[in-house]
Amino acid sequence: MHIVFAASECVPFSKTGGLADVVGALPRALVAAGHQVTVYLPRYRQTLLKDARTVVKSVTVPFDDRYRFCSIVSGGERSGVSFYFVEYPLFFDRDALYGTSAGDYPDNAERFALFSRAVLEASKILGVPQIFHCHDWQSALVPVLLRTQYAEDPAFRDVATVFTIHNMGYQGLFPPDTLPLLTLPWDLFTISKMEFFGNVNFLKGALVFSDFVTTVSKKYSQEIQTTEFGFGLEGVLRARSSTVTGILNGVDYDEWSPETDKFIDARYSPQDLSGKAECKQDLLASFGIIKADLRLPVIGIVSRFAAQKGFDLIAQIMDRLAREEMIIVALGSGDKTYEEIFLRLSKQFPQKIAVKVAYDNAIAHKIEAGSDMFLMPSKYEPCGLNQIYSLKYGTVPIVRATGGLDDTIEHWDSRTGKGTGFKFTDYNGEALLLTIKEALRAFRDQNSWQQLMRNGMTKDFSWNASAKEYVRVYERVRQGRGASTEVRPTSGNANLALV
Ligand code: ADP
Ligand code: GLC
């Protein structure tokens, strides 16, 4: 099968969160399973390309009063996956991907509409796939366009669409006049299509028009069909619940494993944990903590700072948590409110919490390796990757039992020796504090703690199983579109360079 991924971020080219990790890894697993995968991404300022080659000089994208002309640049092939970039510097050559601390870029609808239209037009030249697999609101117009303005395009007659929700909290909401601005028809502005409380909702468009909707854990696929987690779109999802499923994200262990990690001070494994102490010392040093007693438990945090992540709970309990023997090291950036909360806490409790407000991949790896525990008290969490990385690094997760956190972590039971972490359910400071204290108590018995670490380290969350589930979804939607199971040759042409 040929699958085209359309997404707004992907390691190593661009990243703000876990979406980039998923789009970086799943295509490789699909290729390893014998499929052809092409990934389309915007070419941002932060996208570093070695041998960039323009393969389509001009793609025409209509807007209300003008045409815009973008080009398609090939980023070559990596592990068998082809990468193409939509180049339009006016929209994408900027400091950030989606916006700055002052807010989202005001032209995000135009930016990602141009991206989505360019993917469709480019694929007619570079290779029409059997499946378009789109991710989050930034590529949500692909399925909308395919079933509306492109419905009669013979090139796309048998093409099926799969849409993955990575986060219901970001929907791409824009004022109604966005439709004419993007030359989309007004009949999309109805409650059964893209209208949402007086605005245009890109995500809703994808939920209505895609052949199949997936999200990134089983639990979250159920949660988003409820008022508490659906962000107003629960009804849309419930109405099509037979074509909504959860497929747990995998992990790229080439990037995230203490046995091979090049960012950490010493390598270690379940058989030989000794390197972890060195990583702990190095981590503390990089946070300016030189003389700490290495027996003191270290609780790590790596996160986008956003309301979703539950850090208001830490602020609620920090004065009581500070009485415990432990140190918190936190790395994060994003929402100013949470940056300020963390900086304030680190001033108030300098012996107990060290904070770096930054986006820094090397430090993220050091925290995974050098901490004893990893904290994710999320209000909601579609999947969450850091708790899965933590398992591999023997860094015991303390999580709220929601979404993918609940699906990936089993509560530790010292009597049976089973379990991989600590979970709490109620979203309040008391529940969090009790659970952290339980973890700190468990840490005092180092023998059973090592059992707990090893339980996590030997779990396998690699992509193979999840990639198979995606393939089953792709096959199902292809059959739904009446396609034969025989694999058609694609019209992709590697020699095509139209410059
Ligand atoms: P989300 O996508 O909601 O941010 P995930 O847990 O799925 O949450 O993925 C977050 C990814 O982003 C992980 O790879 C994590 O290491 C990375 N990350 C988040 N914040 C930072 C940061 N401040 N510096 C470096 N990496 C970060
Ligand atoms: C989102 C979610 C996170 C998930 C990631 C990748 O950003 O917040 O839980 O792991 O996407 O799917």
Image (tube, rainbow, N blue to C red):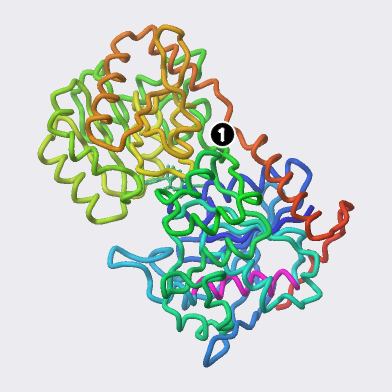
Front-most of residues 258 and 128: 128
Residue 337: percent from left, percent from top: 22, 54
Front-most of residues 83 and 450: 450
Please give left or right for residue 310 compared with residue 171 in the image: left
Position of the C terminus by quadrant: bottom right
Please tell me whether residue 116 belongs to the stretch shown in magenta: yes
Q: Is residue 264 above or below residue 495?
A: above
Kindly report the secondary structure that dominates the magenta region of the rendered protein: helix
Range shown magenta: 111-124
Residue occupying the far bottom of the picture: 65
Res. 276 image quadrant: top left
Please give left or right for residue 174 compared with residue 6 in the image: left
Please give left or right for residue 123 compared with residue 187 in the image: right
What type is the residue that disc 1 sits on?
Tyr
Residue 88: percent from left, percent from top: 53, 75
The residue tagged 1 is 253
Where in the image, quadrant-wise, is ligand 1 located? top left
**At 20% across and 22% down in the image, what residue appears?**
292
Please give left or right for residue 299 compared with residue 114 in the image: left
Q: Is residue 236 above or below residue 376?
A: below
